[in-house]
Image (cartoon, rainbow, N blue to C red):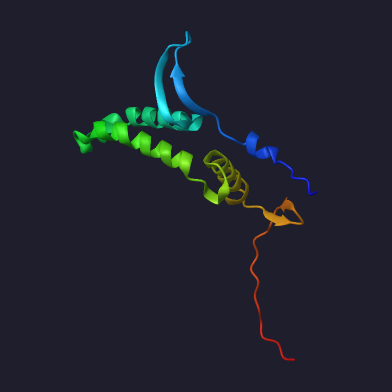
Amino acid sequence: MKEIYYDYSEGLNAPFWIQEIRTPRGKLIWTFTSPMELSYFLILALTALLIIRLFPLLAFLGSMRIVALILVPIKVAKLYVSYEPDGKKMHLFLIDFLVYVFSFIFNKKGLYKGKRVETSPRTIVFGKTKI
């Protein structure tokens, strides 16, 4: 009989889910019909803080500023949690992107045999030759 192996990395990579919010004494404050990821609440709070800081700059929106204060953090948090570029969670993708930018975009050294080396800028002129 063929053995079936369980991949434990799936369980270890699972996000933290929140379905109830309770006080330290155990009193129920809020219940979600479907569990929410912890990263959803973190991004929601960070985006809301950013919108509050930019609130005076959003004067051109008029009365829509209140709607922006409510809807924008919710939409950004849902997008952050649901979208997985390249099959990775968003925070891992952003970390990989920043490593790429600092390693290859800002670092102008060339790669030679897996190591960074200084390259000297020189022009190559091709001339006509008779064979």
* Residue 110, above or below 56: below
Rendered image quadrant of residue 126: bottom right
From the viewer's side, name the closer residue of 60 and 33: 33
Q: Residue lying farthest top?
A: 25
In the figure, is residue 10 to the left or right of 24? right
Instruction: Please tell me which residue lies in front, 70 or 20.
Output: 20
Q: Residue furthest bottom?
A: 131
Q: Position of residue 29 (x, y in %)?
A: 39, 17
Is residue 23 left or right of 93 when viewed as pictured?
Answer: left
Q: How far across and how far down the image is residue 131, in percent?
A: 75, 91
In the rendered view, does 124 fall on the left or right side of 97? right
The quadrant where residue 44 appears: top left
The residue lying toward the viewer, choosing from 75 and 66, is 75
Q: Is residue 51 visible?
A: yes
Residue farthest right in this picture: 1
Residue at the location (65% across, 34% down)? Answer: 12
> Which residue shows up at 46% across the image and 31% down it?
36
Q: Is residue 69 above or below residue 3?
A: above
Write the residue at 37% across / 39% down.
75
Q: Quadrant of residue 8?
A: top right
